[in-house]
Image (spheres, rainbow, N blue to C red):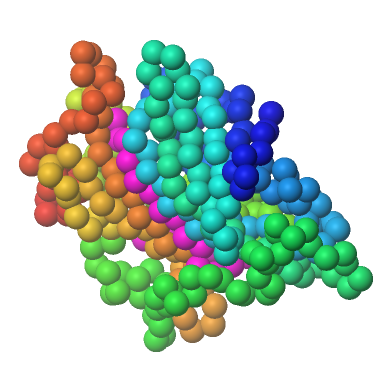
């Protein structure tokens, strides 16, 4: 069900997917971001311009290119989520997810999401009707019209392979390569924003395992699980189907012994350069997974902090 309040669409009766309840019945950050994406799509559908209609009637592809969210409270698998998406102009939206629990009403996500409308390459756009007025102001035409192009930090290969070039650029970074397969993509061509959200989740897990802090080990030995309080994921340039994405992750800072601030960057090789295609930041901590303090933040000891920052490898 959706209702309209000025420029805000309120979507009710949303629930997280069962897939997102990996530890106890708590929902991970990835699925919260999926719900935020759903709220923005609901705004477009309410205005008669859902992704399907935009593509087939107007020859435009709707893309999410930037999402920045705060996650102030836990979301559980049976919670009913109310989502509000408000248009801010210029393709930017404010999104809030809340749970109207009578006993403990709470906001579980607040943030900003940016979208663009691009000309679909394989769709004839001649003789198309004009866009609805509410939509026309956010249209950007051109597959390479990335809104964050100035944020790119491309890496010259200079005769070296991609792994060596990235290691030289940032020796402290963890490196992982993945391929943008068809199930990461949309519009038959390039990777969705959500694929970078998934890549962020996976590269962090791989980084932790590499540092001797795998999720399973921390859960069994310390009854601790990773929790996320802040995330931003930006698409900087398109990644086409079946391209390899060279992904780095590094911890930049540790905050008050309870959380670490990490950065992911993704690159695709084109010619003699690695093109910077995505970047993300994540604020990660640990929570107790059992006992009287379950769900509360834990203070990290010196061994964990040393492993996270690379001062000592386990």
Where is residue 298 shown, x and y percent of the image?
18, 31
Question: Does 235 appear in magenta?
Answer: yes
Q: Please tell me which residue lies in front, 225 or 256.
A: 256
Where is residue 6 shown, x and y percent of the image?
62, 45
Where is residue 242 shown, x and y percent of the image?
62, 61
Q: Please tell me which residue lies in front, 150 or 224.
A: 150
Q: Residue at x 66, y 65 (%)?
A: 137
* Residue 202 located left or right of residue 89: left
**Which residues fall within the magenta stretch?**
225-249
Q: Residue at x 51, y 62 (%)?
A: 235
The reply to whether residue 12 is in sight is yes
Q: Residue at x 13, y 42 (%)?
A: 257
Extreme-front residue of the structure: 6
The image shows residue 150, relative to residue 2, as above or below, that is below
Q: Residue at x 19, y 55 (%)?
A: 253
Quadrant that contains the C terminus: top left
């Amino acid at each position: 069900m959706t209702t309209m309040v000025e420029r805000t669409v309120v979507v009710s009766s949303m629930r997280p997917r069962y897939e997102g309840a990996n530890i106890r019945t708590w929902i991970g950050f990835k699925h919260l971001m999926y719900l935020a994406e759903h709220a923005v799509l609901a705004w477009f559908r309410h205005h008669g311009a859902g992704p399907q209609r935009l593509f087939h009637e107007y020859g435009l592809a709707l893309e999410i290119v930037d999402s920045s969210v705060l996650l102030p409270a836990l979301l559980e698998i049976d919670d009913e989520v109310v989502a509000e998406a408000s248009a801010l102009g210029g393709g930017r939206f404010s999104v809030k997810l809340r749970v109207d629990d009578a006993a403990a009403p709470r906001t579980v996500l607040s943030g900003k999401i940016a979208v663009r409308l691009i000309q679909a390459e394989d769709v004839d756009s001649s003789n198309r009707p004009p866009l609805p007025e509410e939509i026309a102001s956010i249209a950007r035409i051109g597959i390479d019209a990335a809104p964050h192009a100035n944020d790119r930090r491309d890496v010259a290969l200079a005769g070296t392979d991609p792994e060596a070039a990235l290691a030289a650029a940032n020796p402290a970074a963890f490196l992982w390569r993945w391929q943008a397969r068809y199930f990461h993509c949309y519009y038959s061509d390039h990777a969705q924003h959500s694929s970078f959200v998934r890549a962020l989740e996976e590269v962090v897990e791989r980084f932790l395992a590499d540092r001797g802090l795998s999720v399973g080990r921390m859960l069994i030995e310390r009854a601790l699980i990773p929790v996320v309080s802040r995330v931003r994921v930006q698409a900087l340039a398109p990644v086409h189907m079946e391209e390899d994405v060279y992904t780095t992750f590094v911890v930049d800072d540790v905050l008050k012994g309870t959380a670490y601030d990490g950065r992911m960057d993704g690159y695709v090789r084109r010619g003699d350069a690695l093109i910077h295609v995505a970047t993300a930041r994540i604020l990660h901590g640990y929570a107790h997974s059992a006992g009287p303090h379950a769900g509360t933040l834990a203070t990290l000891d010196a061994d964990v902090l040393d492993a996270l920052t690379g001062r000592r490898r386990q």
